[in-house]
Image (spheres, helix red, strand yellow):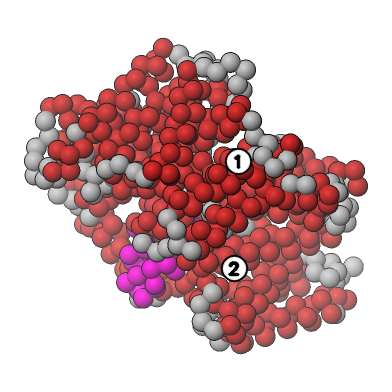
Amino acid sequence: MLRSSPSAISGLGGASALELLARSLGLGGALRGLVGVPDPLELRGFHLAALMPLVFLLYPAWPGRSPAHRPSLPDWVLAVGSVAPSLYILRNAQSINARMEFIDPLTDLQLSLGIAAVALLLEAIRRAVAPVLAGIVLVSLAYMYLGRWLPGVLNTRPFDLPAIVETAYIVPIVGGIYGPLTGIVAATIAMFILFGAFVQGSGTGRLFSAFGSAVAGRYAGGPAKVAVITSGLFGTMSGSTVSNVATTGSITIPMMRRLGYAPAVAGGIEAAASTGGALMPPVMGAAAFVMSEITQIAYGDIIVAAAIGAVLYYFAIFVSVHFEAKRLGLAAMAADEIPPWRSVWADCHLVVPIAVLVWLLMERWSGNFAAFAAILASVICAAVKRRTRMGLRAILNTLASAAATMAVLAVAVAGAGVITSALTVTGLVVAFGSIVKGLAGGSLALLCVLLMVTALVLGMGVPTTPAYIITAALGSPILREFGVDLLSAHLFMFYFAVLADATPPVAVASYAAAAIAGANPLLTGLHALRFALAGFVVGFAFVYDQGVMLRGGLLTIVEETLLLASALTLIGAGFARHLSAPLGFPAALLAVAIGCTVGFGHILPDEARLLLGVGTLAVMAGLPRLFAPQR
């Protein structure tokens, strides 16, 4: 969860020093995309020196008790103090690069700065990201000290305080605060965050909302279908499920409730749809760029492999929403709430920057250059018409918004860097692999289930990017040992790190949607899980059904896509208890059972699964009286 940015930078009635700093950081990201990057360690030091202070100035220590619209004196002290550890890294990058990690002793200054850096990072994560992530960072460091007394595979070699501080602070090759993960954010992801901010600032969000309403608003359960389409389009740019819920859900959830959806159902639909935004190409949030850097697989190849899976995810939510609306007899949106197509066409030029980004990435240009070119295209295309033109104030607002988002992501990924560094030096990754492989007993299916549960547990309350980093570090090597290829292993872990946001009991997207809907968070999370079940089917498909990744011949791709679509349709119809007509409870249970068999029955031939799925749909839809509820 990335907490919503406070209003300190939203209004520009009088530009404060804080706002100007945020704007300058956003502009700095654009310039890096044009002229390149400095030494990696220097860039990481500058990145956190510039962004971490913003967290203390923008996010109060205790919401409700601390000043909400201005930093307090302790906030300023922490902000200034957070610059020192990063400034030391920036000024001494060459000597740090030359030192021998875990051999050269830390100086007293390095030890003091390292302790301060860890303490300040924990507080920044607690304020702006999630206390859960701060707790995981703290536990990982505590494990380094306590592991010597643990039994069995959990036992580690002794780590004293300097070794723990060195692991977290000054080991840029292994990881830590200034490790490769922070470098990925500073060098690449920051540019895409800036691009997303310009896409939203130019009015593309209005285009997405109008398009969704024009396409789906005229049909049964219109607002729910609008939520599905709009959240998918908006979520791929925002990269934050909570931000997506807050932006689109504030409009769609009240509309769904007015039509007759129960509050928890409306919140669950929005939570599931918003969660899927991180799965939707071309941007897929920040985690996809991390995946590209970790795996050294071209970003264009990743979005191609993920495309059908993302479409299937939203297809499943869409048909489930349709069946739910039919069962409840819900109407379409009011005619005066549906925008005419001419208003959609009036903003269609705003799609050009997204097309530029996709084209450059598919042509294998660097991510930095592609994002920078797309930013320029956003400004130019927005200037074509008066209603979308971005003036100086709008551009400064956009830079400020991007800088605030970068600051939160920077501390979240730095925390993930500390966790992965601790997992590496203690050997816990190897120990975890031994435990999981022992429990799986040579079964790939059981291994996938265990890793799925691990990803869902570790992803509770943790933003998608650090959740993916942690779970991929633990799970991907084990999948590779079982013969799963590199991209399939990472997409599997990525999907379940994303779905953790909608999976009870700690489902941050569901909590955000429940707050808007005025519903019970746990019940909302259960409905979100029901609508997001497609993600579980698609996640396993990355391992077993390679056609969903556009691999194999055309026949394989079409066959596996259709069988998964039929499985998801049966599952959605069973949960809604409606297909072409209402379904009785036995028929609904049968539909879910056959849908799960088709979706997860990988031991069966694809032809048999396809025949079972399509045949069952044909029979149940063609003979509605046979499966109708008994009076």
Q: How many residues crowd mark 2 within 10 Å: few (<14), some (14–19), many (20+)?
A: some
Out of 544 and 353, give the one closest to the viewer.
353
Residue drawn at point x = 76 percent, y = 73 percent: 587
Residue drawn at point x = 88 percent, y = 76 percent: 625
Out of 532 and 304, give the one closest to the viewer.
304
Q: How many residues crowd mark 1 within 10 Å: few (<14), some (14–19), many (20+)?
A: many
Is 225 above or below relative to 133?
Answer: below
Q: Quadrant of the C terminus?
A: bottom right
Q: Nearer the viewer, mark 2 or mark 1?
A: 1
Residue 241 appears in view: no
Mark 2 or 1 closer to N-term? 2
Seen in the image, is 458 located left or right of residue 326?
A: left
* Residue 373 spot, x, y in % from top left: 52, 49
* Amino acid carrying mark 2 in the image: Ile
Asked whether residue 495 is drawn in magenta, I would say yes
Q: Which residue is mark 1?
A: 379
Residue drawn at point x = 36 percent, y = 45 percent: 36
* Residue 119 spot, x, y in % from top left: 31, 29
Q: Quadrant of residue 48?
A: top left
Q: Which residues are magenta?
A: 474-497
Out of 397 and 449, give the one closest to the viewer.
397
* Residue 343 spot, x, y in % from top left: 81, 46
Is 496 above or below relative to 544?
Answer: above
SS class, disc 2? helix
Q: Which residue is mark 2?
A: 308
Seen in the image, is 494 located left or right of residue 293?
A: right
* Amino acid carrying mark 1 in the image: Val
SS class, disc 1? helix
Residue drawn at point x = 54 percent, y = 74 percent: 550
Asked whether residue 590 is drawn in magenta, I would say no
Label the magenta part by its dominant secondary structure. helix
